[in-house]
Image (cartoon, rainbow, N blue to C red):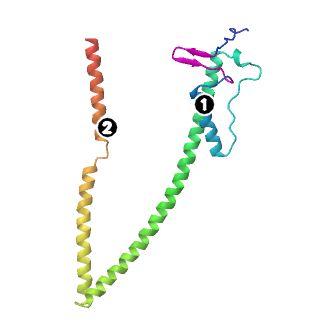
């Protein structure tokens, strides 16, 4: 079965569109796609080779359909590579976050030990003026007061932050929907 004849695609500007045949210059979008694909490949340590035209075709004989198919293939390849790059970035950042969280955890434990030593020092200091049990009671009462104040501040912040819904975004979206509905009613009236 014989298909339609191949459409010859000229190079040049046609209104807002510019058509370039591969090999005779590329559009900015094609250059950006190929450049990004090459960068992604270089980041992954592989060599990037752009999708080449079929060996039996000359650049002037490629149809618009073939060019669109090639653009689709290149876009799919680029999208896959972008997803791979994003996964690699997220993995690397996840590793860094894990190490950072571990360091914060270690700092918290060491800080807790230091706080215990400081508490003992306060108790011993007060024990020079009063009995040791009274000194320990005074230090415990001061810590309880600080904990109570922190709890009240935390409760206030939690109440202001709940429910965790983006209320301003929801309100803005509702206003947009109402505006579209109003415009649709006025357009049909």
The residue wearing badge 1 is 31
Q: Is residue 20 left or right of residue 107?
A: right
Splitting the image into 4 quarters, where does residue 63 fall?
Answer: top right
The residue wearing badge 2 is 169
Q: Pointer 2: residues within 10 angstroms few (<14), some, or many (20+)?
A: few
57 and 14: which is toward the camera: 14
187 and 38: which is toward the camera: 38
Q: Is residue 13 magenta?
A: yes
Separation of marks 2 and 1 at Cα, in angstroms: 37 Å
Residue 111 vs 95, above or below: the answer is below
Region rendered in magenta:
11-23
- SS at circle 2: helix
Residue 132 at least partly seen? no
Residue 142 vs 130, above or below: the answer is above
Instruction: Check contact, mark 2 vs mark 1: CB within 8 A.
Output: no
Residue 157 at least partly seen? yes
User: What residue do we see at 49% from left, 64% from top?
Assistant: 102
User: What residue do we see at 57% from left, 18% from top?
Assistant: 18
- SS at circle 1: helix
């Amino acid at each position: 079965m014989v298909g339609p004849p191949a459409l010859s695609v000229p190079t040049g500007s046609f209104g807002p569109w510019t058509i370039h045949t591969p090999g005779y210059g590329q559009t900015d979008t094609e250059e950006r796609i190929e450049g990004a694909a090459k960068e992604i490949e270089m980041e992954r340590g592989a060599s990037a080779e752009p999708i080449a035209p079929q060996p039996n075709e000359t650049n002037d004989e490629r149809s618009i359909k073939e060019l669109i198919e090639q653009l689709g293939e290149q876009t799919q390849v680029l999208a896959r590579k972008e997803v791979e790059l994003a996964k690699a970035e997220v993995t690397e950042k996840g590793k860094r976050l894990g190490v950072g969280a571990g360091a914060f955890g270690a700092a918290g434990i060491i800080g807790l030990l230091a706080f215990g030593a400081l508490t003992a020092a306060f108790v011993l200091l007060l024990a020079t003026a009063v009995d040791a049990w009274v000194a320990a009671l005074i230090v415990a009462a001061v810590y309880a007061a600080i904990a109570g104040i922190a709890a009240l501040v935390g409760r206030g912040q939690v109440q202001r932050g709940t429910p965790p819904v983006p209320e301003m975004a929801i309100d803005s979206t509702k206003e947009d929907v109402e505006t579209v509905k109003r415009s649709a009613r006025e357009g049909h009236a």
